Amino acid sequence: MTEIVERQTEQTRKSFIGQRRTRVEDERLVRGLGRFVDDVDPPRLVHMALVRCPYPRARIVSIDASAARALPGVLEVLLPEDVLERTDPITILRPIPDAPAIMPRALADGEALYEGQPVVSVCAVSRYIAEDAAGLIEVEYEPQPFVVDVLKAIEDDAPILHEHMGTNVVVTNPRGDGDPERGFEESDVVVEDTFSINRVSGLPMETRAILADWTPGVKTLHVRASTQAPHLFRRQLAQSLRLPEADIRVTCDDVGGAFGLKLGIFAEDLLACVHSMDLGRPVKWVEDRMEFFRGATQARESVHQAKLGVSSDGLIVSYTNRYYVDAGAHNSPMGSPMLSSLMFQGPYKFPNGYVERNVVLTNKVPVGAYRGYGQPEGSFVREVLLDRAARKIEMDRLEIRRKNFIRPDDMPWQTIGGAKYDSGDYRACLDMAAETIGYEDVLLRQAEARADGRYVGVGFGCYVEMTGYPGSKFLGKHNAQYGAHEGVVVRANRSGGVDVYTGVPPIGQSTETAFGQVAATVIGLDPGNVRVFAGDTHGTPVNTGSFASRTLIAGSGAIERAGREVREKALRVAAHMLDVPVETLELEDSVITSTQGPRITFEEVALNAFYAHRMPEGELPGLEATAYYDPISNAFAYGTAAAIVEVDPESGEFTLERFLFVHDCGTQVNPLLVEGQLHGGIAQALGAALFEEIVYDQESGQLVNGSMIDYFMPTAADLPRIELGHTEVASPVTPFGVRGIGESGTIPPGAAVANALADALSPFGVDINRLPLTAEYVWRLLAAKQAAR
Amino acid sequence: MTETIETVRVSVKVNGEEAVRDVEPRRQLVDFLRHDLGLTGTHVGCEQGVCGMCTVLFDGEPIKSCLMLAPQADGHEITTVESLNGEELHPLQRAFKEHHGLQCGYCTPAMLMTALALGRRGVPLDREQLEEELAGVLCRCTGYQKIYDAVESYLAETAGSGGTA
Ligand code: FES
Ligand code: FES
């Protein structure tokens, strides 16, 4: 049985949970007064620029930095030998199970393994001069055999990236249940294919950035970072720089988007710190966009060999997926994504299943976390195959899903991938999506359009999403270098307000607003009286950070506990001040009222608590609490995306006429923010489904489209109006019944669009097996069919 | 330090105030605004003229300030997001807040400058035209929908007021 969270807050008081409230963050951000790393220019600031390897793989024969050193304004040049001895490899925050850690170094150690790997670092009085100097450094490279294709990298004669491993396959993680092979034999219809998922970039509008400021003598390294996890950043810096944590303070005021990409420290962070420690001056590095495409972690690329067997009455008998993740040249702090495996089953139950993850190295930029963390890929493959099976057995695509859904009364459900679903009504979301999009009408319209020579199609994609972690113990078993919990300090102030301190930095996810709503509800104040201070390791409890759709789950639990302590103490102090029994008191709207009549403001109580002039016997001064909350289980979000397309079979071009997303994220703390999270995730998913792809040339190993001009992320003119719907089944395993929402939008859109395309083109018998779905790709599919006729 | 860097004098009217600085001839306008004048509301995302993060008004028209050198702005007028700032939010800023037209807020100043120019132009736009107008500034967080809603409501509000709101 799943443990159920006891709801501590009997909410008879006013609740701000569920309110559509505008954001407190906006007051500074709409004024352009956010403080991003590059907005801070301390006195004596100097700048760093890097020399990066221009080859996919090359031995570094020699480096001549004399001309750079002679350039006026240049303060320091760091060669590999200068930093490798002084820094330790970067720790992996989330190691790949059973795999060797291939940890990044500050600079290439004898050999660079991907185009863009830092080789030399320069510091100068301006970024302009630092870049001039980098251009003057002569590196003699000896290009080496390379491989930039994931399937070629596993061939016997492939060049091995890390010789000591003897293979490019870092690890093979299998997981299964039942007898999949027998299952296929017993199936009436088996469909299978190899699916290619594109390499994409999370592409935050603010690139990576750091400002490192070492004060010699007093030994403090104050770092301003653009990160999702300041406390993890501090720890990793301490490890790699061999400093005690006390010497390091990480501040993160505002982050211009992160999406998984800004987790952990990178080579450039170490280099900026080393320069600062050498020079005793603040050192800034703000990645330019060309560097970004060659240095910041990329995502998603994988090849999936999947097979699905169903009975003639539409039941899934067996499903297998053996996939190869193109991890790039070494591990990044968040490794390669794990959730294509864990969540491979999606919302369906079936007796036989097998999933196998192979993590493969190539001479490309390392892969890291990106919103969805493997779930978009796995979901795409499964949902596309399911549609194909339905077509084969001539069953309606909704019908086959309804038949196989795990039902509410099956919960909690232990999946083959190793997840335990907490609750949910998957069919309700599908039905709502089908009804809203007018499924039956679209089918009629489709028939009419075809008679007209036009090709209209409708498609669906269903998902279940793992949000949060099932507790710190789970992460411990996986050797993660962090816990599943969040901690907060909730402290009253002497003006009658409450200050909340959290290590979760603002990355666009609206934590300040949502945490404020929760704290205000728990304590009994208006949210306007709660101030959230976020993202500075000085003054916030050690925490984990903003990722894995976990912040609100763990954070609201911590606020609930700390807030309750503050509230209860306020009531005890008030009882003493008013000389009434504590049971007679209630705190609401900042006023404590006794059923016996007397009342006192929260402000007066707080002031007295800090003066401690009139405290109950044995009560300590102050009015604050620190609390941690460690989740007891994951909460699983779920839903259905639906798309309508019209395709021009002559050109392969198509328009996305409608796009709809119905989801359940449990209790919605703030529906306005939920919509925003979905819109953003969906836009990223549609970008990856329709346009985005990082391409490497097989011949030269070179990155082909490493600039914003050549990499097409969607603009305002490229996306359809996104329609949203939701159901609201409170999760029984989280505080307040919330499920995470940050990543949902990224998961099913690709499948919905692909299935709509396949539906539109069903007269041609076209099968879709890759992303992105460019017009050229669709045209090629159709041309191949025509040629075969 | 032995640096002897050639500089040129640039005088620009920024948000109504005269600013005079000696800068390297190659100084980008966006760096001039951000790092010489301390107006950090204008951001940088690509330095290539693609992302639009650096959008400011140049003699009233939106331009990408990463594509212009500071000396080219000599004698001209620049308007940045800071021009909207007061104790109360400007109606355009308020529209963004009310419609949740921002998340990380990195693209917001550029969106605001683009929308401000649209409002001043005062030409009615249909949905498609408005999307095209906004397409010069990228946003990775919002999916644009709520930005669109915010701008649309602001434009409706300013229509008739001559775009002075
Ligand atoms: S910084 Fe991207 S357009 Fe100017
Ligand atoms: S709000 Fe983050 S880029 Fe637009």
Image (tube, helix red, strand yellow):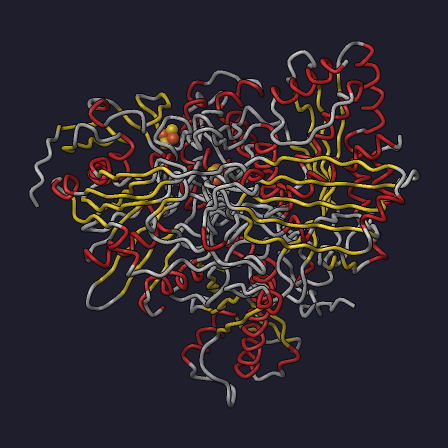
Farthest-out residue, bottom: A617
User: Is B74 drawn above or below residue A297 in the view shown?
Assistant: above
- Is B15 situated left or right of B118 in this image? left
Task: Please state which of residues A418 and A184 is positioned toward the viewer in this rendering.
Answer: A184
Q: Quadrant of ligand 1?
A: top left
Quadrant of the image containing the N terminus of chain A:
bottom right
Farthest-out residue, right: A313
Task: Please state which of residues A134 and A160 is positioned toward the viewer in this rendering.
Answer: A160
- Image location of residue A253, percent across then percent down: 39, 52
Residue B3, picture quadrant: top left
- Image location of residue A322, percent across then percent down: 68, 45
Task: Please state which of residues B86 and A100 is positioned toward the viewer in this rendering.
Answer: A100
- Is A333 situated left or right of B86 in this image? right
Residue B34, picture quadrant: top left
Q: Residue at x 30, y 57 (%)?
A: A84
Q: Is residue B94 visible to us here?
A: no
User: Is B93 drawn above or below residue A123 in the view shown?
Assistant: above
Question: How many numbered discs, if any?
Answer: 0
Q: Is residue B100 visible to us here?
A: yes
Q: Residue at x 77, y 10 (%)?
A: A453
User: Is B57 drawn above or below residue A194 in the view shown?
Assistant: above
- Image location of residue B97, percent across then percent down: 50, 40
User: Is A585 drawn above or below residue A38 in the view shown?
Assistant: below
Farthest-out residue, front: A157
Q: Residue at x 62, y 41 (%)?
A: A746
Quadrant of the image containing the C terminus of chain A:
top right
- Image location of residue A336, percent across then percent down: 55, 50
